[in-house]
Amino acid sequence: MNILQINSSIRGAASASTGLATRLVERLRVADPTSELVIRDFGKNPHPILDEAALIARFTPTESRTSEQTARLALDDKRVAEIQNADVIVVSAPMYNLGISVQLKSWIDAISRAGVTFRYTANGPEGLLKGKKMYVVFARGGKYHGTPADTQTPYLRAVFGLLGITDIEFINAEGLNMGPDFERDGLDSARRHIDVLTAPALAKAA
């Protein structure tokens, strides 16, 4: 099993979403000690944003690209290869100003490539990253799950669905800025959810 862990918090070791994502990955690896893990921490090493130069490079024929365009696209190609190779993707997704972080969005823009990770057909878009399992770990200061203010869940479900990833588990750690009691309860709830999700694999491996 190949696991790809995507950390998108800017808080480093203090990040709740990263800590929970790491807990999940550790349990998955206990269940499968032969698994291979790739970690990308875009809080520490952000992927370049999709700007005009990068977009032009994508639509420039290979033989006509400048060295700068080739180098820029090579960065995106590495991120695409990583998710193509992954069987399981674990994404840490803190909420910043009611949305995902720019670090996570830049990765999504890098891997969302028409003709590579999805394609247009007569019946509409078709995802090309099928058969993968994804876990998304949310960390939020307030409580948004199940409310109209939760913009993250529908967006991530839609964008990864476009790529063919439909088997997604969402793990919510909420109320983290509402006081110590809410923070403790929110983290404990997320940990329990992770333990429940990974328990069958751990039991099978025992």
Image (cartoon, rainbow, N blue to C red):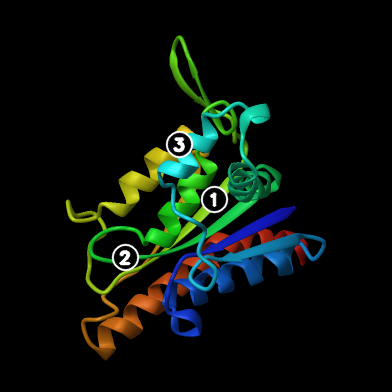
What percent of the width, then of the height, locates residue 185?
Answer: 33, 80
- What residue is shown at x 44% (from left), y 53% (from top)? 49
Q: Name which residue type carries label 3.
A: Gly
Please tell me the numbered disc located at residue 161.
3
Q: Would you say 66 lies left or right of 196 here?
A: right
Residue position for label 1 = 134
Please tell me the numbered disc located at residue 85.
none
Front-most of 63 and 26? 63
- Between circles 1 and 2, the one closer to the viewer is 2
View extreme (bottom): residue: 180
Instruction: Place residue 122 in its image quadrant.
Output: top left
Taking 92 as reference, is 66 above or below it? Answer: above
Q: Earlier in the sequence, mark 3 or mark 2?
A: 2
Q: Earlier in the sequence, mark 1 or mark 2?
A: 2
Q: Element type at marker 2?
A: loop
What separation in Å lies between label 3 and label 1 (alpha carbons)?
Answer: 11 Å
What separation in Å lies between label 1 and label 2 (alpha carbons)?
Answer: 18 Å
Q: Name which residue type carries label 1.
A: Met
What percent of the width, then of the height, locates residue 118?
Answer: 53, 29
Q: Would you say 46 lies left or right of 71 here?
A: left
What percent of the width, then of the height, locates residue 125?
Answer: 45, 22
Residue position for label 2 = 95
Q: Is residue 143 among what the camera can see?
A: yes
Front-most of 99 and 170? 99
